Image (cartoon, helix red, strand yellow):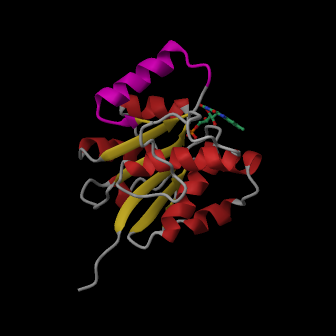
C-alpha cells in the first residue's frame, strides 16, 4: 500500500520575514513524509520581492501545491481536506486580525479558520513591532482559540553566528509542533 504524505498548509502573508516562509518550504521539500500546500497573500508577494532574492514563481515552485489567494473553493478551504494543520509565516497584523475576527475573505484566512474549527494545529508567526493593544488583543483571541503563537524572536542560548542560524532555530521550534526534526536545531539539554 502506498503511504500518503502528510499535508501541511503554509500561509505566507505580508509581514516582514518572507524568508522564514521560504525556509520552511525548503525544509518540507527535503522531507519525504510531508507535502506543503502554499497560499501567498498579495502582501507577501510584495515582501518576497522587497526582501528576498526569490522570484514569486521560484517560491511557488518550492511547494508541492499552490493555491490562488482568491480561490476560496480550493481544497484547503474545506474541513474535510485532511491536513496536519497550518503555519502562517510570516503573519501580518492584518492577517492576525482577519483570523481573530473570523473574517475569512481570502483563502489564507479561510484555511486558518478551518484549521481552528477542525481543532487542528495552527501556528501563527506574527511579526510587527511595537505591538499596540489591538494587535495584542487579537493575538490573545487567537491563543484562546487554540492557535500557537510563535513570534520570530531571537534566541541567544544556542549562540547563533548568523541570521541563517537564528532563522533555523525559529523554524526548528515551529516544526517541533508538528513533530518534525530540523537539522541544526539545538535543544537545551540542561547545564
Ligand atoms: C516591505 C514591507 C514590510 C511589511 N512589514 C510588515 C510587518 O512586519 N508586519 C505587518 O503587520 N505588516 C507589514 N507590512 C504591511 C502589510 O504587508 C500590509 O498590511 C498588508 O495589507 C497585509 O496584508 P496580508 O496580511 O493580506 O498580506 C509590510 C509591508 C511591506 C511592503
Picture layout, residue 144 above or below residue 80: above
Picture layout, residue 59 above or below residue 50: below
Front-most of residues 132 and 71: 132
Q: Residue furthest top?
A: 133
State which quarter of the image contains the C terminus: top left
Q: Which residue lies furthest to the front in this view?
A: 191
Find out whether residue 8 is within the magenta segment.
no
Front-most of residues 58 and 30: 30
Find out whether residue 133 is within the magenta segment.
yes
Q: Point out residue 107 in the picture as x, y percentages from the top left corner.
A: 44, 49
Whether residue 2 is visible: yes
Magenta region: which residues? 129-148
Magenta: main secondary structure: helix
Instruction: Residue at 40% x, 40% y: name it.
Output: 104
Q: Point out residue 35 in the picture as x, y percentages from the top left corner.
A: 42, 67
Quadrant where ligand 1 appears? top right
Instruction: Residue at 57% x, 41% y: name it.
Output: 158
Amino acid at each position: 500500500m502506498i503511504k500518503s504524505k502528510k499535508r501541511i498548509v503554509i500561509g505566507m502573508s505580508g509581514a516582514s520575514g518572507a524568508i522564514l516562509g521560504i525556509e520552511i518550504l525548503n525544509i518540507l521539500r527535503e522531507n519525504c513524509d510531508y507535502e506543503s500546500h502554499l497560499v501567498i497573500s498579495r502582501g507577501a508577494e510584495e515582501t518576497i520581492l522587497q526582501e528576498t532574492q526569490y522570484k514569486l514563481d521560484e517560491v511557488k515552485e518550492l511547494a508541492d501545491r499552490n493555491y490562488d489567494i482568491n480561490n476560496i473553493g480550493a481544497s484547503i478551504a474545506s474541513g474535510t481536506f485532511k491536513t496536519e494543520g497550518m503555519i502562517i509565516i510570516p503573519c501580518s497584523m492584518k492577517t492576525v486580525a482577519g483570523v481573530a475576527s473570523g473574517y475569512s475573505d481570502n483563502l489564507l484566512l479561510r484555511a486558518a479558520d478551518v484549521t481552528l474549527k477542525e481543532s487542528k494545529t495552527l501556528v501563527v508567526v506574527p511579526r510587527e513591532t511595537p505591538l499596540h493593544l489591538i494587535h495584542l488583543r487579537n493575538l490573545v483571541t487567537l491563543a484562546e482559540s487554540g492557535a500557537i503563537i510563535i513570534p520570530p524572536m531571537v534566541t541567544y542560548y544556542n549562540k547563533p553566528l548568523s541570521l541563517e542560524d537564528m532563522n533555523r532555530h525559529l523554524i526548528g521550534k515551529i516544526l517541533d509542533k508538528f513533530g518534525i526534526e530540523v537539522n541544526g536545531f539545538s535543544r537545551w539539554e540542561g547545564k
